[in-house]
Image: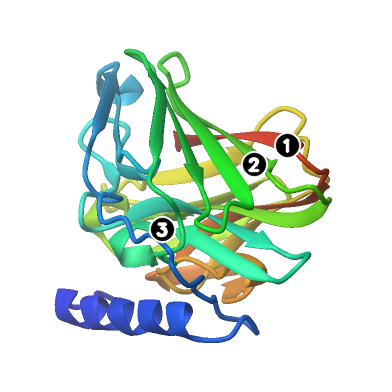
């Protein structure tokens, strides 16, 4: 079913306030002195390739959020102002804390420092961002893969402290295929996807977006999640609000990674967004 834009905006505002203000038992907490960045929905870096069925166009905000994905041509899967992509980190050891930036619709914990642009080419952008308490630095390299076509997202999480820490790292997306908020969702050990199904004999052919782990991640645990709500998860409770299959719902997807990262060490994982 369709949601009115007013209902969705009010629901989002309520969700974000809860995520920021509540305790860590299933909700996120805000670190005092955190930096709230309002540029996570603006298109700072635009990428485009192909045509027709190989067409891929997407935008990346200066914070490393992907604000728009269109593939194949004429089929928007994540729209400016009507869907978003983002990331989250949970610090488990030495005081539990949650950090996330899922864009205006997904929620922002407000405890990230300003992003730093490390490099930019015609096909990629590399952005680093440190939590406001200085514990973690997340470096994202987002690269266009025209041949597939796909968006490759490489995330490196560095522990900046002198002790080993367990971290949860989450990538998340609110998929609204062809601008429709009610989609179907499912997940596997290495992926999660949202789509509009094809309706047989009605000349109505479905489209969708998949987020998939590629290669050998340095994180020991990986799992995809189909979420039955459209806003992003608390990274410390990444499996919350998820089901094995979600149908005809304004939902979202997440891909979670878990591992211990040594003092002053980092771990890297790579995933791709691709249409199907």
Q: How far apart are labels 2 and 1 at the CA level?
A: 6 Å
Residue 248, image x and y in percent?
41, 70
Question: Badge 2: how crowded within 10 Å, few (<14), some, or many (20+)?
Answer: many
Q: Is residue 62 above or below residue 162?
A: above
Q: Residue at x 65, y 72 (%)?
A: 237
Mark 1 against mark 3, which lies toward the viewer?
A: 1
Position of residue 216 relative to residue 185, above or below, is above
- Judging by the rendered image, the residue that carries numbered circle 2 is 157
- Which one is nearer the viewer's eye here, 162 or 180? 162
| Alpha-carbon span between mark 1 and mark 3 | 21 Å
Residue 102: mark: 3
Image quadrant holding the N terminus, namely bottom left
Nearer-N-terminus badge (2/1): 2
Identify residue for label 1. Answer: 267
First reached walking from the N terminus: tag 1 or tag 3:
3
Q: Is label 2 in contact with label 1 (beta carbons under 8 Å)? A: yes
């Amino acid at each position: 079913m369709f949601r009115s834009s007013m209902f969705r905006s009010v629901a989002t505002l309520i969700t974000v306030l809860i995520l920021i203000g509540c305790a860590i038992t299933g909700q996120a907490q805000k670190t005092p002195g955190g930096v709230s960045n309002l540029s996570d929905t603006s298109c700072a870096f635009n990428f485009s390739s192909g045509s027709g069925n190989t067409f891929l166009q997407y935008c990346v905000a200066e914070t490393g959020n992907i604000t728009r994905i269109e593939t194949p041509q004429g089929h928007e899967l994540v729209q400016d102002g009507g869907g978003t992509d983002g990331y989250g980190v949970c610090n488990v050891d030495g005081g539990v804390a949650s950090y996330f930036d899922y864009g205006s619709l997904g929620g922002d914990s407000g405890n990230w420092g300003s992003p730093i642009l490390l490099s930019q080419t015609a096909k990629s952008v590399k952005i680093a961002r440190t939590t406001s308490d200085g514990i973690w630095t997340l470096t994202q390299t987002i690269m266009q893969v025209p041949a597939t076509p796909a968006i490759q997202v490489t995330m490196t999480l560095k522990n900046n402290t002198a002790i080993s820490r367990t971290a949860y790292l989450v990538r998340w997306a609110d998929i609204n295929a062809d601008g429709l908020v009610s989609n179907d969702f499912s997940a596997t050990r290495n992926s999660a996807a949202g789509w509009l199904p094809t309706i047989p004999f009605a000349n109505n052919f479905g489209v969708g977006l998949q987020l998939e782990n590629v290669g050998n991640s340095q994180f020991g645990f990986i799992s995809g999640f189909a979420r039955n709500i459209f806003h992003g998860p608390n990274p410390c409770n990444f499996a919350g609000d998820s089901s094995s299959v979600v149908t005809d719902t304004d939902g979202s997807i997440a891909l979670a990674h878990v591992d211990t990262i040594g003092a002053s060490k980092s771990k890297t994982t790579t995933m791709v967004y691709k249409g199907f």
